[in-house]
Image (spheres, coloured by chain):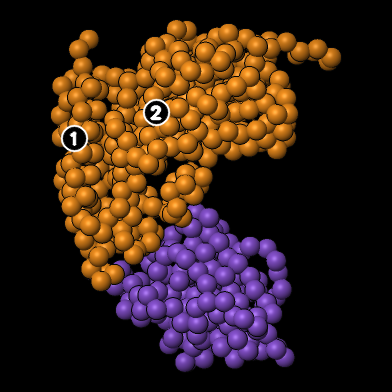
Amino acid sequence: MSDSLKELYQEIILDHARHPRHAGVLADANAEAEGYNPLCGDRVKIYARLKDGRIAGLTFEGKGCAISQASASLMVEMLQGRTIEEAESLRDAFLHLVKGHEHTGMSEDDRERLEVMAGVQQFPMRVKCATLAWHTLHEAVTGGHETVSSQDETP
Amino acid sequence: MSPRPFDVARIRAEFPILARSVNGHPLTYLDNAASAQKPRAVIEAMREVMEEEYANVHRGVHYLSARATLRFEAARETARRFLNAEKEEEVLFTHGGTEAFNLIASSFLEPTIEPGDEIVLSEMEHHSNIVPWHFLRERKGAVLRWAALKPDGSLDLDHFASLLNRRTRLVATSHMSNVLGTVTPANEIVHIAHAHGVPVLFDGCQAAVHRRIDVRALDCDFYVATGHKLFGPTGIGLLYAKARHLKVMRPYQGGGEMIRTVGFDKITYAAAPHRFEAGTPPIIEAIGLGAALEWWMGEDRDAGFAHEHDLLTYTAERLKELNWIRIFGEAEGKGAIIAFEVEGVHAHDVATIIDSRGVAVRAGHHCAQPLMQRLGTPATARASFAIYNTREDADRLIAALHHVREVFA
Protein backbone atom coordinates (compact mmCIF):
# COMPACT_ATOMS: atom_id res chain seq x y z
CA MET A 1 0.00 0.00 0.00
CA SER A 2 1.32 3.47 -0.76
CA ASP A 3 2.34 5.52 2.26
CA SER A 4 -0.29 8.19 1.75
CA LEU A 5 -2.99 5.55 1.40
CA LYS A 6 -1.74 3.84 4.54
CA GLU A 7 -2.03 7.12 6.36
CA LEU A 8 -5.55 7.72 5.06
CA TYR A 9 -6.90 4.30 5.91
CA GLN A 10 -5.17 3.83 9.23
CA GLU A 11 -6.36 0.92 11.32
CA ILE A 12 -7.98 3.28 13.80
CA ILE A 13 -10.00 4.93 11.04
CA LEU A 14 -11.16 1.61 9.67
CA ASP A 15 -12.00 0.56 13.20
CA HIS A 16 -14.16 3.63 13.76
CA ALA A 17 -15.84 3.07 10.40
CA ARG A 18 -16.61 -0.56 11.20
CA HIS A 19 -17.56 -0.01 14.82
CA PRO A 20 -18.86 3.54 15.11
CA ARG A 21 -18.92 4.89 18.67
CA HIS A 22 -22.09 6.45 20.06
CA ALA A 23 -24.06 5.49 16.96
CA GLY A 24 -27.82 5.84 16.96
CA VAL A 25 -30.55 8.23 17.98
CA LEU A 26 -30.13 10.09 21.27
CA ALA A 27 -33.47 9.74 23.03
CA ASP A 28 -33.36 12.99 24.99
CA ALA A 29 -31.62 15.08 22.36
CA ASN A 30 -32.59 18.76 22.31
CA ALA A 31 -30.53 19.68 19.25
CA GLU A 32 -29.96 17.91 15.98
CA ALA A 33 -28.80 18.58 12.47
CA GLU A 34 -28.35 16.68 9.25
CA GLY A 35 -25.41 16.77 6.91
CA TYR A 36 -25.45 15.48 3.35
CA ASN A 37 -22.93 15.58 0.55
CA PRO A 38 -25.05 14.94 -2.53
CA LEU A 39 -22.07 14.22 -4.76
CA CYS A 40 -20.81 11.32 -2.65
CA GLY A 41 -24.00 10.37 -0.91
CA ASP A 42 -22.36 10.75 2.51
CA ARG A 43 -24.96 11.32 5.22
CA VAL A 44 -24.52 12.21 8.87
CA LYS A 45 -27.15 13.09 11.42
CA ILE A 46 -26.01 14.54 14.73
CA TYR A 47 -28.07 14.34 17.94
CA ALA A 48 -27.00 16.42 20.91
CA ARG A 49 -28.26 17.12 24.39
CA LEU A 50 -27.09 20.58 25.31
CA LYS A 51 -27.17 21.71 28.92
CA ASP A 52 -25.64 24.82 30.51
CA GLY A 53 -23.32 25.41 27.60
CA ARG A 54 -22.16 21.80 27.58
CA ILE A 55 -22.63 18.84 25.29
CA ALA A 56 -24.15 16.48 27.82
CA GLY A 57 -24.79 13.82 25.21
CA LEU A 58 -23.84 13.35 21.57
CA THR A 59 -24.60 10.60 19.04
CA PHE A 60 -24.72 10.24 15.29
CA GLU A 61 -26.34 8.19 12.59
CA GLY A 62 -24.79 7.99 9.21
CA LYS A 63 -24.15 6.24 5.96
CA GLY A 64 -21.27 6.84 3.65
CA CYS A 65 -17.60 6.31 3.03
CA ALA A 66 -15.19 5.13 5.70
CA ILE A 67 -13.65 8.59 6.09
CA SER A 68 -16.95 10.39 6.70
CA GLN A 69 -18.19 7.79 9.17
CA ALA A 70 -14.90 7.45 11.03
CA SER A 71 -14.64 11.21 11.34
CA ALA A 72 -18.14 11.40 12.81
CA SER A 73 -17.45 8.56 15.21
CA LEU A 74 -14.19 10.07 16.39
CA MET A 75 -15.82 13.46 16.81
CA VAL A 76 -18.75 12.31 18.95
CA GLU A 77 -16.39 10.22 21.05
CA MET A 78 -14.14 13.19 21.74
CA LEU A 79 -16.81 15.76 22.46
CA GLN A 80 -18.86 13.98 25.13
CA GLY A 81 -19.23 16.37 28.06
CA ARG A 82 -17.16 19.15 26.52
CA THR A 83 -18.39 22.74 26.39
CA ILE A 84 -19.93 24.06 23.19
CA GLU A 85 -17.20 26.64 23.10
CA GLU A 86 -14.53 23.97 23.21
CA ALA A 87 -16.30 21.98 20.50
CA GLU A 88 -16.46 25.01 18.23
CA SER A 89 -12.84 25.83 18.71
CA LEU A 90 -11.85 22.20 18.14
CA ARG A 91 -13.89 22.28 14.95
CA ASP A 92 -11.91 25.27 13.69
CA ALA A 93 -8.68 23.54 14.51
CA PHE A 94 -9.84 20.35 12.83
CA LEU A 95 -10.78 22.15 9.61
CA HIS A 96 -7.29 23.61 9.52
CA LEU A 97 -5.72 20.29 10.29
CA VAL A 98 -7.36 18.34 7.46
CA LYS A 99 -6.52 21.04 4.96
CA GLY A 100 -2.90 21.00 6.03
CA HIS A 101 -3.05 24.57 7.35
CA GLU A 102 -1.46 25.88 10.53
CA HIS A 103 -3.66 25.33 13.52
CA THR A 104 -3.46 26.32 17.15
CA GLY A 105 -5.66 26.04 20.18
CA MET A 106 -5.70 22.27 20.41
CA SER A 107 -4.57 20.47 23.52
CA GLU A 108 -1.83 17.91 23.09
CA ASP A 109 -4.32 15.14 23.78
CA ASP A 110 -6.85 16.39 21.20
CA ARG A 111 -4.15 16.85 18.64
CA GLU A 112 -2.94 13.31 19.12
CA ARG A 113 -6.40 11.88 18.63
CA LEU A 114 -7.30 14.02 15.62
CA GLU A 115 -3.95 13.52 13.90
CA VAL A 116 -5.28 10.20 12.56
CA MET A 117 -7.48 12.22 10.19
CA ALA A 118 -4.57 14.27 8.88
CA GLY A 119 -4.03 11.72 6.10
CA VAL A 120 -6.79 13.37 4.05
CA GLN A 121 -4.41 16.27 3.44
CA GLN A 122 -2.97 14.15 0.63
CA PHE A 123 -6.44 13.58 -0.85
CA PRO A 124 -8.01 16.97 -1.56
CA MET A 125 -11.16 15.37 -3.00
CA ARG A 126 -11.78 13.61 0.30
CA VAL A 127 -11.45 16.59 2.67
CA LYS A 128 -15.19 17.18 2.46
CA CYS A 129 -15.82 13.62 3.69
CA ALA A 130 -13.80 14.31 6.83
CA THR A 131 -15.38 17.68 7.56
CA LEU A 132 -19.06 16.79 7.07
CA ALA A 133 -19.66 15.69 10.67
CA TRP A 134 -17.98 18.76 12.10
CA HIS A 135 -20.00 21.14 9.93
CA THR A 136 -23.14 19.28 10.95
CA LEU A 137 -22.21 19.51 14.60
CA HIS A 138 -21.80 23.26 14.22
CA GLU A 139 -25.30 23.48 12.75
CA ALA A 140 -26.70 21.40 15.62
CA VAL A 141 -25.13 23.41 18.44
CA THR A 142 -25.92 26.78 16.86
CA GLY A 143 -29.53 25.82 16.25
CA GLY A 144 -29.55 25.98 12.46
CA HIS A 145 -32.16 24.14 10.47
CA GLU A 146 -30.53 23.87 7.08
CA THR A 147 -29.21 20.56 5.85
CA VAL A 148 -25.46 20.99 5.92
CA SER A 149 -23.13 20.16 3.09
CA SER A 150 -19.35 20.26 2.97
CA GLN A 151 -19.55 19.70 -0.79
CA ASP A 152 -18.00 23.04 -1.60
CA GLU A 153 -15.18 22.65 0.87
CA THR A 154 -12.07 24.17 -0.62
CA PRO A 155 -9.17 21.81 -0.11
CA MET B 1 -11.95 6.38 -48.49
CA SER B 2 -11.50 3.16 -46.55
CA PRO B 3 -10.85 3.57 -42.84
CA ARG B 4 -7.53 2.87 -41.16
CA PRO B 5 -7.41 -0.71 -39.84
CA PHE B 6 -8.06 -0.79 -36.10
CA ASP B 7 -4.95 -1.21 -34.00
CA VAL B 8 -5.26 -0.32 -30.36
CA ALA B 9 -1.53 0.34 -29.92
CA ARG B 10 -1.61 2.85 -32.77
CA ILE B 11 -4.80 4.42 -31.38
CA ARG B 12 -3.22 4.75 -27.93
CA ALA B 13 -0.21 6.46 -29.44
CA GLU B 14 -2.57 9.17 -30.73
CA PHE B 15 -3.48 10.12 -27.15
CA PRO B 16 -0.45 11.72 -25.47
CA ILE B 17 -1.94 11.62 -21.97
CA LEU B 18 -2.15 7.83 -22.01
CA ALA B 19 1.64 7.65 -21.80
CA ARG B 20 1.77 9.28 -18.40
CA SER B 21 1.78 7.59 -15.05
CA VAL B 22 -0.38 8.40 -12.04
CA ASN B 23 0.73 7.77 -8.47
CA GLY B 24 3.70 5.80 -9.78
CA HIS B 25 1.60 3.47 -11.91
CA PRO B 26 0.72 3.51 -15.61
CA LEU B 27 -2.49 5.48 -16.11
CA THR B 28 -5.52 3.20 -16.38
CA TYR B 29 -8.17 5.63 -17.53
CA LEU B 30 -11.62 4.13 -17.07
CA ASP B 31 -13.62 7.31 -16.59
CA ASN B 32 -14.48 7.80 -20.25
CA ALA B 33 -18.21 8.16 -19.67
CA ALA B 34 -17.44 11.32 -17.69
CA SER B 35 -15.03 12.66 -20.29
CA ALA B 36 -12.74 11.16 -22.92
CA GLN B 37 -9.08 11.96 -23.49
CA LYS B 38 -7.98 13.93 -26.54
CA PRO B 39 -6.09 12.70 -29.59
CA ARG B 40 -3.24 14.62 -31.19
CA ALA B 41 -5.51 15.56 -34.10
CA VAL B 42 -7.67 17.66 -31.76
CA ILE B 43 -4.79 19.21 -29.86
CA GLU B 44 -3.07 20.11 -33.12
CA ALA B 45 -6.18 21.51 -34.80
CA MET B 46 -6.91 23.79 -31.85
CA ARG B 47 -3.31 24.90 -31.57
CA GLU B 48 -3.11 25.48 -35.30
CA VAL B 49 -6.24 27.59 -35.53
CA MET B 50 -5.06 29.75 -32.63
CA GLU B 51 -1.58 30.12 -34.06
CA GLU B 52 -2.51 30.62 -37.68
CA GLU B 53 -6.15 31.17 -38.56
CA TYR B 54 -8.00 32.67 -35.66
CA ALA B 55 -10.48 35.55 -35.71
CA ASN B 56 -14.17 35.97 -34.96
CA VAL B 57 -16.55 34.26 -37.35
CA HIS B 58 -19.37 35.43 -39.60
CA ARG B 59 -18.63 39.15 -39.27
CA GLY B 60 -15.23 40.13 -40.46
CA VAL B 61 -14.55 40.51 -44.14
CA HIS B 62 -10.86 40.18 -43.53
CA TYR B 63 -8.78 37.15 -44.37
CA LEU B 64 -8.54 35.56 -40.91
CA SER B 65 -12.24 35.96 -40.23
CA ALA B 66 -13.03 34.33 -43.53
CA ARG B 67 -10.65 31.44 -42.78
CA ALA B 68 -11.99 30.94 -39.26
CA THR B 69 -15.57 31.04 -40.55
CA LEU B 70 -14.75 28.46 -43.19
CA ARG B 71 -13.22 26.12 -40.66
CA PHE B 72 -16.04 26.68 -38.16
CA GLU B 73 -18.69 25.87 -40.75
CA ALA B 74 -16.63 22.95 -42.04
CA ALA B 75 -16.84 21.52 -38.52
CA ARG B 76 -20.63 21.79 -38.76
CA GLU B 77 -20.57 19.86 -42.02
CA THR B 78 -18.39 17.21 -40.35
CA ALA B 79 -20.90 16.98 -37.50
CA ARG B 80 -23.73 16.70 -40.00
CA ARG B 81 -21.98 13.74 -41.63
CA PHE B 82 -21.28 12.21 -38.23
CA LEU B 83 -24.98 12.32 -37.33
CA ASN B 84 -26.11 11.75 -40.92
CA ALA B 85 -28.42 14.73 -40.72
CA GLU B 86 -29.95 15.82 -43.98
CA LYS B 87 -29.02 19.49 -43.80
CA GLU B 88 -26.22 21.43 -42.16
CA GLU B 89 -28.67 23.92 -40.70
CA GLU B 90 -30.21 21.12 -38.67
CA VAL B 91 -26.99 20.84 -36.67
CA LEU B 92 -26.65 23.44 -33.93
CA PHE B 93 -23.51 24.08 -31.96
CA THR B 94 -24.21 24.47 -28.25
CA HIS B 95 -21.85 24.86 -25.33
CA GLY B 96 -22.41 21.24 -24.38
CA GLY B 97 -25.06 18.60 -23.97
CA THR B 98 -26.67 20.43 -21.07
CA GLU B 99 -27.33 23.56 -23.09
CA ALA B 100 -28.92 21.50 -25.86
CA PHE B 101 -31.56 20.08 -23.46
CA ASN B 102 -32.22 23.51 -22.02
CA LEU B 103 -32.57 24.93 -25.50
CA ILE B 104 -35.24 22.40 -26.45
CA ALA B 105 -37.08 22.95 -23.17
CA SER B 106 -36.99 26.71 -23.56
CA SER B 107 -37.44 27.16 -27.32
CA PHE B 108 -39.48 24.16 -28.36
CA LEU B 109 -41.70 23.21 -25.43
CA GLU B 110 -42.04 26.17 -23.11
CA PRO B 111 -43.86 28.54 -25.51
CA THR B 112 -46.74 26.13 -26.04
CA ILE B 113 -46.83 23.75 -23.08
CA GLU B 114 -50.01 23.84 -20.97
CA PRO B 115 -50.50 22.83 -17.34
CA GLY B 116 -51.09 19.08 -17.27
CA ASP B 117 -49.17 18.42 -20.48
CA GLU B 118 -46.82 15.50 -20.08
CA ILE B 119 -43.17 14.76 -20.80
CA VAL B 120 -42.09 11.14 -20.86
CA LEU B 121 -38.59 10.31 -19.59
CA SER B 122 -37.02 7.07 -18.47
CA GLU B 123 -35.81 6.24 -14.98
CA MET B 124 -32.20 6.13 -16.13
CA GLU B 125 -31.79 9.71 -17.32
CA HIS B 126 -28.82 11.92 -16.57
CA HIS B 127 -29.70 15.09 -14.65
CA SER B 128 -29.14 17.17 -17.79
CA ASN B 129 -32.11 15.36 -19.34
CA ILE B 130 -34.19 15.73 -16.18
CA VAL B 131 -33.71 19.16 -14.68
CA PRO B 132 -34.79 21.24 -17.73
CA TRP B 133 -38.09 19.29 -17.71
CA HIS B 134 -38.44 19.84 -13.96
CA PHE B 135 -38.19 23.56 -14.78
CA LEU B 136 -41.26 23.15 -17.00
CA ARG B 137 -42.99 21.22 -14.23
CA GLU B 138 -42.26 24.02 -11.75
CA ARG B 139 -42.94 26.94 -14.07
CA LYS B 140 -45.64 25.61 -16.38
CA GLY B 141 -47.32 22.80 -14.51
CA ALA B 142 -46.00 20.13 -16.84
CA VAL B 143 -46.19 16.54 -15.60
CA LEU B 144 -43.17 14.23 -15.78
CA ARG B 145 -43.86 10.57 -16.49
CA TRP B 146 -41.12 8.02 -15.95
CA ALA B 147 -40.74 4.88 -18.04
CA ALA B 148 -39.67 2.00 -15.81
CA LEU B 149 -36.69 -0.31 -16.16
CA LYS B 150 -36.67 -4.07 -16.06
CA PRO B 151 -34.50 -5.83 -13.46
CA ASP B 152 -31.67 -6.25 -15.99
CA GLY B 153 -31.61 -2.49 -16.56
CA SER B 154 -33.30 -2.50 -19.95
CA LEU B 155 -36.16 -0.15 -20.73
CA ASP B 156 -39.61 -1.60 -20.14
CA LEU B 157 -41.01 -0.79 -23.56
CA ASP B 158 -44.55 -1.84 -22.67
CA HIS B 159 -44.57 0.46 -19.69
CA PHE B 160 -43.11 3.20 -21.83
CA ALA B 161 -45.85 2.75 -24.44
CA SER B 162 -48.53 2.83 -21.72
CA LEU B 163 -47.40 6.31 -20.65
CA LEU B 164 -48.16 7.96 -23.98
CA ASN B 165 -51.47 9.71 -24.38
CA ARG B 166 -52.96 12.83 -25.91
CA ARG B 167 -51.35 15.02 -23.24
CA THR B 168 -47.84 13.81 -24.09
CA ARG B 169 -45.80 16.62 -25.62
CA LEU B 170 -42.35 15.10 -25.77
CA VAL B 171 -40.46 11.87 -25.24
CA ALA B 172 -36.94 12.56 -23.96
CA THR B 173 -34.89 9.45 -23.23
CA SER B 174 -31.35 8.31 -23.09
CA HIS B 175 -30.01 6.48 -26.13
CA MET B 176 -27.44 4.85 -23.84
CA SER B 177 -27.37 5.09 -20.05
CA ASN B 178 -24.29 6.69 -18.50
CA VAL B 179 -24.63 4.39 -15.47
CA LEU B 180 -26.03 1.07 -16.64
CA GLY B 181 -24.70 1.16 -20.19
CA THR B 182 -28.18 0.16 -21.37
CA VAL B 183 -28.83 0.99 -25.02
CA THR B 184 -32.49 1.85 -25.46
CA PRO B 185 -34.56 0.52 -28.38
CA ALA B 186 -34.47 3.84 -30.21
CA ASN B 187 -36.33 2.75 -33.33
CA GLU B 188 -39.21 1.30 -31.31
CA ILE B 189 -39.34 4.39 -29.10
CA VAL B 190 -39.65 6.65 -32.14
CA HIS B 191 -42.17 4.35 -33.75
CA ILE B 192 -44.40 4.29 -30.66
CA ALA B 193 -44.08 8.01 -29.98
CA HIS B 194 -44.72 9.05 -33.56
CA ALA B 195 -47.81 6.84 -33.68
CA HIS B 196 -49.10 9.21 -30.96
CA GLY B 197 -47.83 12.24 -32.86
CA VAL B 198 -45.23 12.88 -30.13
CA PRO B 199 -41.75 14.14 -31.01
CA VAL B 200 -38.71 12.31 -29.62
CA LEU B 201 -35.46 13.66 -28.22
CA PHE B 202 -32.54 11.32 -27.61
CA ASP B 203 -29.76 11.98 -25.16
CA GLY B 204 -26.92 10.60 -27.24
CA CYS B 205 -24.08 11.89 -25.07
CA GLN B 206 -22.95 8.30 -24.44
CA ALA B 207 -24.41 6.52 -27.45
CA ALA B 208 -22.69 8.79 -29.98
CA VAL B 209 -19.36 7.58 -28.61
CA HIS B 210 -20.15 3.88 -28.77
CA ARG B 211 -22.52 3.45 -31.72
CA ARG B 212 -22.96 4.74 -35.24
CA ILE B 213 -25.59 7.47 -35.17
CA ASP B 214 -27.97 8.02 -38.04
CA VAL B 215 -30.63 10.55 -37.13
CA ARG B 216 -32.37 10.08 -40.46
CA ALA B 217 -32.68 6.31 -40.05
CA LEU B 218 -33.82 6.87 -36.44
CA ASP B 219 -36.26 9.53 -37.64
CA CYS B 220 -35.91 11.19 -34.22
CA ASP B 221 -36.85 14.84 -33.84
CA PHE B 222 -33.90 15.90 -31.69
CA TYR B 223 -30.55 14.34 -30.89
CA VAL B 224 -28.01 15.60 -28.36
CA ALA B 225 -24.30 14.82 -28.23
CA THR B 226 -21.43 16.44 -26.41
CA GLY B 227 -17.94 17.16 -27.67
CA HIS B 228 -15.76 16.27 -24.73
CA LYS B 229 -16.97 12.69 -24.54
CA LEU B 230 -16.34 12.34 -28.29
CA PHE B 231 -12.60 12.97 -27.91
CA GLY B 232 -13.18 16.67 -28.57
CA PRO B 233 -12.75 19.66 -26.26
CA THR B 234 -15.08 20.84 -23.51
CA GLY B 235 -17.45 23.76 -24.13
CA ILE B 236 -18.99 22.39 -27.32
CA GLY B 237 -22.05 20.25 -27.91
CA LEU B 238 -24.25 19.21 -30.80
CA LEU B 239 -27.98 19.51 -31.11
CA TYR B 240 -29.66 17.96 -34.09
CA ALA B 241 -33.18 19.21 -34.70
CA LYS B 242 -35.46 18.52 -37.62
CA ALA B 243 -35.72 21.55 -39.88
CA ARG B 244 -39.50 21.77 -39.52
CA HIS B 245 -39.14 22.12 -35.74
CA LEU B 246 -36.40 24.72 -36.04
CA LYS B 247 -38.70 26.83 -38.20
CA VAL B 248 -41.23 27.24 -35.42
CA MET B 249 -38.92 27.25 -32.42
CA ARG B 250 -38.58 30.44 -30.42
CA PRO B 251 -35.09 31.93 -30.35
CA TYR B 252 -33.12 30.78 -27.33
CA GLN B 253 -30.71 33.44 -26.10
CA GLY B 254 -30.69 36.92 -27.56
CA GLY B 255 -27.57 38.67 -28.77
CA GLY B 256 -25.33 39.07 -31.73
CA GLU B 257 -25.13 36.51 -34.51
CA MET B 258 -28.75 35.34 -34.08
CA ILE B 259 -30.43 38.41 -35.59
CA ARG B 260 -31.07 39.66 -39.07
CA THR B 261 -32.05 43.24 -38.26
CA VAL B 262 -32.37 45.08 -34.99
CA GLY B 263 -34.30 48.35 -34.85
CA PHE B 264 -35.60 50.56 -32.05
CA ASP B 265 -38.97 48.82 -31.93
CA LYS B 266 -38.60 45.89 -34.27
CA ILE B 267 -36.40 42.86 -34.64
CA THR B 268 -36.04 40.06 -37.14
CA TYR B 269 -34.08 36.91 -36.58
CA ALA B 270 -31.53 34.99 -38.55
CA ALA B 271 -32.43 31.56 -39.88
CA ALA B 272 -31.32 28.33 -38.22
CA PRO B 273 -28.77 27.37 -37.14
CA HIS B 274 -27.51 30.86 -36.30
CA ARG B 275 -30.85 31.90 -34.83
CA PHE B 276 -30.05 29.57 -31.95
CA GLU B 277 -26.37 30.45 -31.60
CA ALA B 278 -26.37 33.91 -30.00
CA GLY B 279 -23.08 35.60 -29.38
CA THR B 280 -19.62 34.59 -30.48
CA PRO B 281 -19.79 30.81 -30.66
CA PRO B 282 -17.18 28.43 -29.26
CA ILE B 283 -15.09 28.73 -32.42
CA ILE B 284 -11.93 26.95 -31.38
CA GLU B 285 -13.93 24.25 -29.63
CA ALA B 286 -16.11 23.63 -32.69
CA ILE B 287 -13.01 23.28 -34.85
CA GLY B 288 -11.53 20.96 -32.24
CA LEU B 289 -14.67 18.84 -32.24
CA GLY B 290 -14.64 18.77 -36.03
CA ALA B 291 -11.07 17.46 -35.89
CA ALA B 292 -12.10 14.81 -33.35
CA LEU B 293 -14.96 13.59 -35.52
CA GLU B 294 -12.84 13.60 -38.68
CA TRP B 295 -10.19 11.59 -36.87
CA TRP B 296 -12.70 9.12 -35.46
CA MET B 297 -14.58 8.71 -38.75
CA GLY B 298 -11.25 7.98 -40.42
CA GLU B 299 -10.78 4.98 -38.15
CA ASP B 300 -12.48 1.62 -38.57
CA ARG B 301 -15.19 2.47 -36.08
CA ASP B 302 -16.94 -0.88 -36.29
CA ALA B 303 -13.72 -2.63 -35.33
CA GLY B 304 -13.35 -0.09 -32.51
CA PHE B 305 -16.85 -0.86 -31.26
CA ALA B 306 -16.08 -4.58 -31.40
CA HIS B 307 -12.93 -3.93 -29.36
CA GLU B 308 -14.96 -2.06 -26.74
CA HIS B 309 -17.45 -4.90 -26.64
CA ASP B 310 -14.63 -7.34 -26.01
CA LEU B 311 -13.41 -5.17 -23.12
CA LEU B 312 -16.91 -5.04 -21.69
CA THR B 313 -17.50 -8.80 -21.75
CA TYR B 314 -13.95 -9.58 -20.58
CA THR B 315 -14.18 -7.20 -17.63
CA ALA B 316 -17.72 -8.22 -16.69
CA GLU B 317 -16.71 -11.89 -16.68
CA ARG B 318 -13.68 -11.20 -14.51
CA LEU B 319 -15.78 -9.13 -12.10
CA LYS B 320 -18.42 -11.85 -11.87
CA GLU B 321 -15.75 -14.26 -10.65
CA LEU B 322 -15.54 -12.10 -7.52
CA ASN B 323 -18.44 -12.80 -5.21
CA TRP B 324 -17.85 -9.50 -3.40
CA ILE B 325 -18.65 -7.44 -6.49
CA ARG B 326 -22.17 -6.50 -7.51
CA ILE B 327 -22.75 -5.23 -11.05
CA PHE B 328 -25.63 -2.88 -11.88
CA GLY B 329 -27.13 -3.25 -15.33
CA GLU B 330 -26.86 -6.31 -17.53
CA ALA B 331 -29.16 -5.43 -20.38
CA GLU B 332 -28.67 -7.28 -23.65
CA GLY B 333 -26.53 -5.27 -26.08
CA LYS B 334 -25.36 -2.78 -23.47
CA GLY B 335 -22.45 -0.42 -24.07
CA ALA B 336 -19.02 -0.50 -22.45
CA ILE B 337 -19.93 0.89 -19.04
CA ILE B 338 -19.92 -1.14 -15.82
CA ALA B 339 -21.36 0.27 -12.61
CA PHE B 340 -20.52 -1.84 -9.58
CA GLU B 341 -20.25 -2.05 -5.84
CA VAL B 342 -17.56 -3.64 -3.68
CA GLU B 343 -19.27 -5.37 -0.79
CA GLY B 344 -18.87 -3.44 2.43
CA VAL B 345 -16.85 -0.61 0.93
CA HIS B 346 -18.27 2.75 -0.10
CA ALA B 347 -17.69 3.70 -3.74
CA HIS B 348 -15.58 6.70 -2.77
CA ASP B 349 -13.21 4.58 -0.75
CA VAL B 350 -13.00 2.19 -3.71
CA ALA B 351 -12.15 5.03 -6.09
CA THR B 352 -9.52 6.53 -3.78
CA ILE B 353 -7.79 3.21 -3.18
CA ILE B 354 -7.66 2.11 -6.81
CA ASP B 355 -6.52 5.60 -7.80
CA SER B 356 -3.40 4.90 -5.75
CA ARG B 357 -2.75 2.20 -8.37
CA GLY B 358 -3.31 4.65 -11.23
CA VAL B 359 -6.82 3.41 -11.99
CA ALA B 360 -9.31 6.23 -12.65
CA VAL B 361 -13.00 5.43 -12.22
CA ARG B 362 -15.95 7.53 -11.27
CA ALA B 363 -17.65 7.09 -7.91
CA GLY B 364 -20.90 8.67 -6.88
CA HIS B 365 -24.40 9.05 -8.24
CA HIS B 366 -23.23 9.83 -11.79
CA CYS B 367 -25.72 12.70 -12.09
CA ALA B 368 -28.55 10.19 -12.10
CA GLN B 369 -30.08 10.40 -8.64
CA PRO B 370 -33.53 9.05 -9.63
CA LEU B 371 -31.81 5.98 -11.05
CA MET B 372 -29.69 5.53 -7.93
CA GLN B 373 -32.90 5.71 -5.90
CA ARG B 374 -34.31 2.93 -8.07
CA LEU B 375 -31.16 0.86 -7.63
CA GLY B 376 -31.35 1.44 -3.88
CA THR B 377 -27.80 2.72 -3.49
CA PRO B 378 -26.48 6.25 -2.91
CA ALA B 379 -23.31 5.69 -4.90
CA THR B 380 -21.63 3.19 -7.17
CA ALA B 381 -18.24 2.93 -8.75
CA ARG B 382 -18.24 3.00 -12.53
CA ALA B 383 -15.66 1.78 -15.01
CA SER B 384 -16.30 3.09 -18.51
CA PHE B 385 -14.26 2.10 -21.52
CA ALA B 386 -13.10 3.80 -24.68
CA ILE B 387 -11.50 2.49 -27.85
CA TYR B 388 -8.02 3.11 -26.44
CA ASN B 389 -8.48 0.87 -23.42
CA THR B 390 -7.02 -2.62 -23.33
CA ARG B 391 -7.47 -5.91 -21.49
CA GLU B 392 -4.40 -4.89 -19.47
CA ASP B 393 -6.45 -1.93 -18.21
CA ALA B 394 -9.17 -4.36 -17.15
CA ASP B 395 -6.59 -6.57 -15.42
CA ARG B 396 -5.20 -3.57 -13.55
CA LEU B 397 -8.71 -2.64 -12.44
CA ILE B 398 -9.29 -6.15 -11.10
CA ALA B 399 -5.93 -6.22 -9.32
CA ALA B 400 -6.63 -2.83 -7.77
CA LEU B 401 -10.03 -4.04 -6.56
CA HIS B 402 -8.31 -6.92 -4.78
CA HIS B 403 -6.19 -4.27 -3.10
CA VAL B 404 -9.39 -2.55 -1.90
CA ARG B 405 -10.33 -5.80 -0.19
CA GLU B 406 -6.91 -5.98 1.46
CA VAL B 407 -7.17 -2.46 2.84
CA PHE B 408 -10.64 -3.14 4.20
CA ALA B 409 -9.92 -6.72 5.26
Residue labelled with disc 1 = B310
Where is residue A79? Give x, y as percent: 55, 86
Name the spot of residue B267 as percent of width and height, x first.
Answer: 76, 13
Rendered colour, chain A: purple
Looking at numbered disc 2 in the image, what kind of residue is underneath it? Thr
Q: Nearer the viewer, mark 1 or mark 2?
A: 2
Q: Mark 2 points at which residue?
A: B184
Q: In which quarter of the image is residue B287?
A: top left
Q: Mark 2 lies on which chain?
A: B
Q: Nearer the viewer, residue B86 or B321?
A: B321
**Is disc 1 placed on a helix, strand or loop?**
helix
Mark 2 Cα shell of 10 Å, populated few (<14), some (14-19), many (≥20): many
Chain of the residue where label 1 is placed in the rendered structure:
B
Element type where label 2 sits in the image? loop
User: What is the x, y in percent for residue B237?
Assistant: 48, 27
Q: Measuring 38% from the left and 15% from the top, which residue is drawn there?
A: B214
The residue depicted at 52 percent of the width and 77 percent of the height is: A24
Give the vertical position of B111 relative to B377 (above or below): above
Question: Label 1, label 2: how many angstroms apart (C-alpha)?
Answer: 20 Å
